[in-house]
Image (cartoon, rainbow, N blue to C red):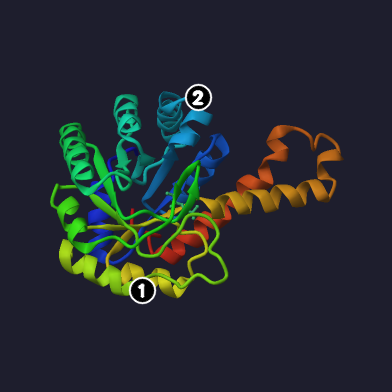
Amino acid sequence: MLVSATDMLKQARKEGYAVGAFNINNLEWTKAILQTAQELNSPVMLGVSEGAGKYMTGFKTVAAMVKAMDESLGIKVPVALHLDHGTYEGSYKCIDAGFTSIMFDGSHFDIEENVAKTKELVSVCHHLGMSIEAEVGGIGGEEDGVVSQGECADPDECKRIADLGIDMLAAGIGNIHGKYPANWAGLRFDVLEKITEKVGADMPLVLHGGTGIPEDQIKKAISMGVSKINVNTECQLYFQEATRKYIEEGKDQQGKGYDPRKLLAPGFEGIKEIVKIKMEMFGSVGKA
Ligand code: 13P
C-alpha cells in the first residue's frame, strides 16, 4: 500500500524503532524489498536517488513500476516511495511523477537558502499529502555522484529546519555513505543528543549511511530518536557477492543458467537476506 511516510515514522518515533529506507535500482531490487517487507509485516521506504531515477529512465517510470508492483504483489504493509537526496528541481519532478515522499537535500546551500527552499517544498508536499525530509550538515562520502565531506549538523540550524514542519530530519552525526573506513570514529552521540534536545522528542531523525554501522550504535541511535535508517551499499554488496558466487561456480554455464531470470536470482535472494537482517535489527518487524 503506497502511502506517505508521515504516519509510519510518527509511530516508529513513538514506539522506539526505525523504518528502513532501502535504495532501489531496478525491478529485482524493488521486488526483493517489497516482498521482504510484506513477509515480515514491516513498514518500508523505497529510496530513489536522482542517479537511480535517471538509470531507470526517469521518476515517472519508477513511480509507475512501484505502483503497479505494489498492486500486483498484493502488498498490504505501508510503503513510501521516497526521493533520496533530491535537488530542488528533482523534488518537483518526483512530486509530478506521483512519489509519496521526498527528501530535499539543501545541506550544501547556506542555511537561509536551505530554509527558504525547504519551507516552500513543505507547503507543496503537505498540500498533496506527501511527506518531506530535509537535511542539515552533510553526510560524508559519495553516493551517485553526490559528494560530501561529512560534517556534524549544528543543533540550532536543525531546530530552524525542523520548525518548518518537515516530517523527518537528516542531520549529520559523523555518518558517511558507503563503506566505513577502518579508522572511523563512530557516531557522534553527543551531537545527536543536542539535536534531539533542540528539535524535541516528536521529530523522527534520519540516519543516512546505514551500511556497516555496528548494531550497538544503531540501537543506541534509535533509542535517541533515529526513526528512519537508509541502507544502500549493503544491498549492492549482497547482490554482488551472490552473483559472483553463481558465476564462479560455473552455474551460468549449466543448462539454461544464462537465462537472466536465473542469473539474477541469487542476487535477488541476497537483497532479501540483508533487508531481513536490517529490518530485524531496526525493530520494524511486525509493526505494519
Ligand atoms: P549507504 O550506502 O552507506 O548504506 O547509505 C545509504 C544512504 O544513506 C542513502 O541516502
- Left or right: where 149 falls relative to 203: right
Residue 137 rendering spot, x and y as whole percentages: 32, 55
Residue 127 rendering spot, x and y as whole percentages: 15, 33
In this rendering, the answer to whether 102 lies above or below 15 is above
Place residue 74 in its image quadrant. top left
In this view of the protein, which residue sits in the foreground, 226 or 75? 226
Kindly identify the residue that appears in the image at 54 percent across and 34 percent down.
Answer: 27
Residue 205 rendering spot, x and y as whole percentages: 28, 58
**What kind of residue is marked 1?**
Lys
Q: Which residue is mark 1?
A: 220
Kindly identify the residue that appears in the image at 31 percent across and 33 percent down.
Answer: 91
In this view of the protein, which residue sits in the foreground, 100 or 224? 224
- Left or right: where 87 falls relative to 265: left
Disc nearer the start of the sequence (1/2): 2
Place residue 226 in its image quadrant. bottom left
- Left or right: where 266 falls relative to 127: right
* Quadrant of the image containing the N terminus: top left
- Label 2 CA crowd tier, 10 Å (few <14, some 14–19, many 20+): few
Q: CA distance from mark 1 to mark 2?
A: 39 Å
Visible in this render: residue 83? no
**What kind of residue is marked 2?**
Thr
Visible in this render: residue 169? yes
Kindly identify the residue that appears in the image at 17 percent across and 35 percent down.
Answer: 120
- Left or right: where 245 falls relative to 214: right
Q: Is the CB–ligand 1 distance for label 1 below 8 Å? A: no
Kindly identify the residue that appears in the image at 24 percent across and 37 percent down.
Answer: 130
Q: Which residue is mark 2?
A: 57
SS assignment at label 2: loop
In this view of the protein, which residue sits in the foreground, 216 or 118? 118
